Amino acid sequence: MSLRTAWQEISWHAAKLAAAIKAEDVGLIHELTADVANGAMMLDDIVRSYGLESVDSGTEA
């Protein structure tokens, strides 16, 4: 999976999460927060598999 595809997956789940939050659907919120978190971990795995080094952007997170 590419970085772009992983980001699209995270974005898709985050958009669904926003709708669940708006609807106050607690069960769906729990499910989708897990999906977003899993996507973020997958993205990190992809970055590590590419052997990409951290780059100092001059900003702090």
Image (cartoon, rainbow, N blue to C red):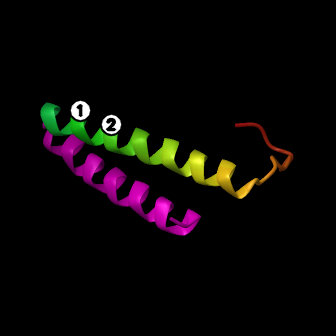
Q: Position of residue 19 (x, y in %)?
A: 22, 51
Q: Which residue is mark 2?
A: 34
> Which of these two is toward me, 19 or 48?
48
Above or below — where is 2 with respect to 17? below
Q: Residues within 10 Å of mark 1 (few under 14, many from 20)?
A: few
Q: Residue at x 80, y 46 (%)?
A: 54
Q: Residue at x 80, y 43 (%)?
A: 59
Q: Are marks 2 and 1 in contact (CB under 8 Å)?
A: yes
Q: Residue at x 49, y 60 (%)?
A: 7
- Check residue 19 for magenta coloring: yes
Span colored in magenta? 1-25
Q: Could you tell me the amino acid type at mark 1? A: His
Q: Which residue is mark 1?
A: 30
Q: Residue furthest front?
A: 49
* Helix, strand or loop for disc 1: helix
- The overriding secondary structure of the stretch rendered in magenta is helix
Q: Could you tell me the amino acid type at mark 2? A: Ala
